[in-house]
Image (cartoon, rainbow, N blue to C red):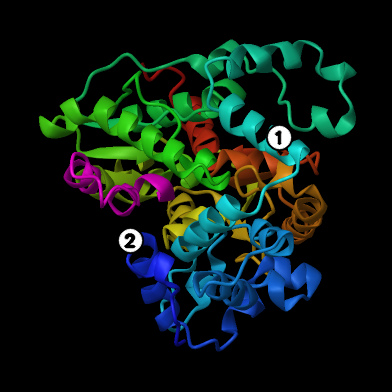
Amino acid sequence: MQTDIAPEFASTPEGIEADAILRKCVHCGFCTATCPTYQLLGDELDGPRGRIYLMKQVLEGHAPTRSTQMHLDRCLTCRNCETTCPSGVQYGNLLEIGRRIVDARVPRPAGERMLRWALKEGLTSPLFKPALKMGQSVRSLLPEALRAKVPPPAPASAHRWPAREHPRKVLLLMGCVQPAMLPNINSATARVLDAAGIQTLVADEAGCCGAIRLHLDDHQGALEHMRRNIDAWWPLVAAGSVEAIVMNASGCGVTVKEYGHSLRHDAAYSEKARRVADLTRDLSELLRDIVPALAKELSPNAARPRLAFHPPCTLQHGQQLRGGVETHLRELGFDVQVALNEAHLCCGSAGTYSLLQPELAMPLRDRKLGHLAALEPQAIVSANIGCIQHLQSGTTTPVRHWIEVLDEAIAVSLPSID
């Protein structure tokens, strides 16, 4: 696609990057077939090809409008289009640039500004945990829509952390909302890795990976989160004390794996960011290597629940990791199936999307749950807290992280592994 970037953008880093991305696009339209919002709305401007046209116009000097902003907002950033694109167009990076430019030129209504500010400041704040506890204490009194966003209090066992030390060590990002909302995901991760002879370390100063602020177009705030995490991890990384930085939330994983790109223009952090990104592994990538060790910890004849696996977009499209979770769980004796239809489509969670675009997020959720229900599972498993919470709000079937199910199977086989 030929572009004529306006002078105000032509010499800027974001303008140069956007121009290079646009030139790869041949406008074939393959991406529309796998775009969730295009599937729902049937509007060219609510698919990747139409949004690329809108961003191209802005970069060529046309004034963006509130309509431009709305169509960019509706994108889930699931990056399914990147998986489909035969030309390798980096749509996610282009969208980030386009949203930033449009938001700087198109004021949002006061209500939108307040909601977005509350999400980016509240979800990443130390006050989130006590606020959630307060919500849990009155959960039964909350309106149904809000109650679905507030999980019941976790049992004390959800905080049980292994005490053994091992020569093999990894760093785990606890995340911003996960320790408060679903703490068992992190402790189950540590217990499973402990059973495989790997010790899980945590840097207390690390927090949100930066994804929430990126979702809300707070680019500078996201970069500050990234720098803070790098500073927290760097002593252990520089000393070679850990073999990997592990992500059990695939949304965090795709963001941290792109730290090198995000901070490439920061002279003080670019090399550190690249090294951190190179060390980062999704939890499923570790699972591949520890299957033999875990197989020894599991009772081969024990009953296992029938599972339906929902692969998050951030895993299968953002990180381009497909098939690993279900394959390795099957190797460990689990009955795991993936939806026969539309397994590649987003469930509608997409970070803060389900809160900002509920009129699109809920139909996508129900569509996904319909395909998963056809498998008649005893439980649905996924790999990202956002997907887990969003799907659970629409079904009575338990929705969990796959690591929790694996942890429980090990606990049944070996009641005490600490």
Residue drawn at point x = 35 percent, y = 18 percent: 204
Res. 58 image quadrant: bottom right
Between 405 and 369, the residue placed more toward the observer is 369
Res. 36 image quadrant: bottom right
Instruction: Tell me the tag on residue 13.
Output: 2
- The percent coordinates of residue 41 (x first, y second) are 80, 70
Q: Earlier in the sequence, mark 2 or mark 1?
A: 2
Residue drawn at point x = 41 percent, y = 66 percent: 9
Instruction: Tell me the tag on residue 115.
Output: 1
Residue drawn at point x = 81 percent, y = 30 percent: 146
- The percent coordinates of residue 271 (x first, y second) are 17, 46
Q: In the picture provided, is 174 more to the left or to the right than 123?
A: left
Instruction: Tell me the tag on residue 62.
Output: none
Residue 305 in sight from this viewpoint: no
Q: Nearer the viewer, mark 2 or mark 1?
A: 2
Between 224 and 336, the residue placed more toward the observer is 224
- The percent coordinates of residue 239 (x first, y second) are 10, 29
Q: Quadrant of the C terminus?
A: top left
Amino acid type at circle 2 is Pro
**How many C-alpha atoms fall within 10 Å of the one at disc 1: few (<14), some, or many (≥20)?**
few
Against 350, is 337 above or below?
below
**How many C-alpha atoms fall within 10 Å of the one at disc 2: few (<14), some, or many (≥20)?**
few
Q: Is residue 272 magenta?
A: yes
Say which element carries label 1.
helix
Against 202, is 8 above or below?
below
Give the residues drawn in magenta, as a range: 254-274
Say which element carries label 2.
helix
